[in-house]
Amino acid sequence: GEDVEQSLFLSVREGDSSVINCTYTDSSSTYLYWYKQEPGAGLQLLTYIFSNMDMKQDQRLTVLLNKKDKHLSLRIADTQTGDSAIYFCAESIRFNKFYFGSGTKLNVKP
Amino acid sequence: DAGITQSPRHKVTETGTPVTLRCHQTENHRYMYWYRQDPGHGLRLIHYSYGVKDTDKGEVSDGYSVSRSKTEDFLLTLESATSSQTSVYFCAISEQGTGPNTEAFFGQGTRLTVV
C-alpha cells in the first residue's frame, strides 16, 4: 500500500495552537484530506487541499502542503477540549482509492 | 450525514465460522470501500468497488471476499474468521470524479471480535 505516516500522539493546552504533521509517498496524489474521529464514531471530513495548492485556511484550521517534501500539516488555532480526537491524513490517488495514515491522537488539557 | 448504514454494529464470533458484514448506502455513490482500523495501523483498505460487480483488492485483502450485486449494498465476507481479524470495520462511499466529490463518507463502524 501507499505510505502515509503520522506521529501517534500530541498533547496541548487549551487555547494553544496544535500542529499535526503527515508525510506521504505518492506524488500522484490529487487531493489530500484531514479527517477527525471522535470516540466510538466513524471518520468525518474536516478539510481537504488540492495538490497544486500550498495553503488552505478554513476558520480555525490551516492546511499547509509542501509537495516537494510530500509533507502535509494541519494547524488548529485556539485548540479547545472538544478538539480532542484522532486526526487522520489521507490521500486520494488512482481509481478514487484513499490511503490513510495511522492517525494522531490529540489530547487537549484544560 | 451521508446515508450509510453498517450492520451489524457489533458481533462476536468463533474462530473458523463465516461472517458477513453489510454496508448499505442511499446516496447512489459509485465507489464503496471496506477498511479495517487497528491501533497503530490507522485505516487499511481491504477491498473496494467501482461499480456493480466491479471490485478489486486493497492492501490487506487476504482472508476477505466482497460482493456488490446492487449499487446500494457492499458485502464483506470472512470465509473462516481468525483472531487476527478482530478489528473495527468501516465502510466508506464516494462519488466518481475529481474535486471535493472524491471525499469519502464513512459509516459508524462494525466492531468484530473473533474468539
Image (cartoon, coloured by chain):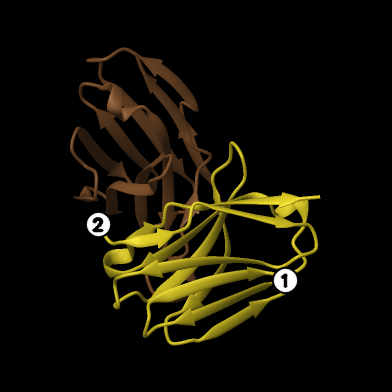
Chain colours: A yellow, B brown
Residue shown at 28% from the left, 43% from the top: B68
Pinpoint residue B91: horizontal percent, then vertical percent.
42, 44
The numbered disc on residue B64 is: none
Q: 10 Å neighbourhood of mark 2: few (<14), some, or many (≥20)?
A: few
Pinpoint residue A66: horizontal percent, then vertical percent.
45, 82
Q: On screen, A64 above or below A47?
A: below
Query: As drawn, is A94 to the left or to the right of A54?
Result: left
Q: Which subunit holds the residue at mark 1?
A: A
Q: Amino acid at mark 1?
A: Arg
Q: SS for tag 2?
A: loop
Q: Nearer the viewer, residue B110 or B97?
A: B110
Decide: marks 2, 1 in contact (CB < 8 A)?
no
Report which quarter residue A69 is drawn in.
bottom left
Q: Nearer the viewer, residue B15 or B76?
A: B15
Q: Nearer the viewer, residue A96 or A52?
A: A52
Report which quarter residue B72 is drawn in.
top left
Report which quarter residue B28 is drawn in.
bottom left
Pinpoint residue B59: horizontal percent, then vertical percent.
24, 50
The numbered disc on residue A60 is: 1
Q: Which subunit holds the residue at mark 2?
A: A
* Pointer 2 and pointer 1 on the same chain: yes
The numbered disc on residue A1 is: 2
* Disc nearer the start of the sequence (2/1): 2
**Quarter of the image where the N terminus of chain A is located:** bottom left
Query: As drawn, is A104 to the left or to the right of B59?
Result: right
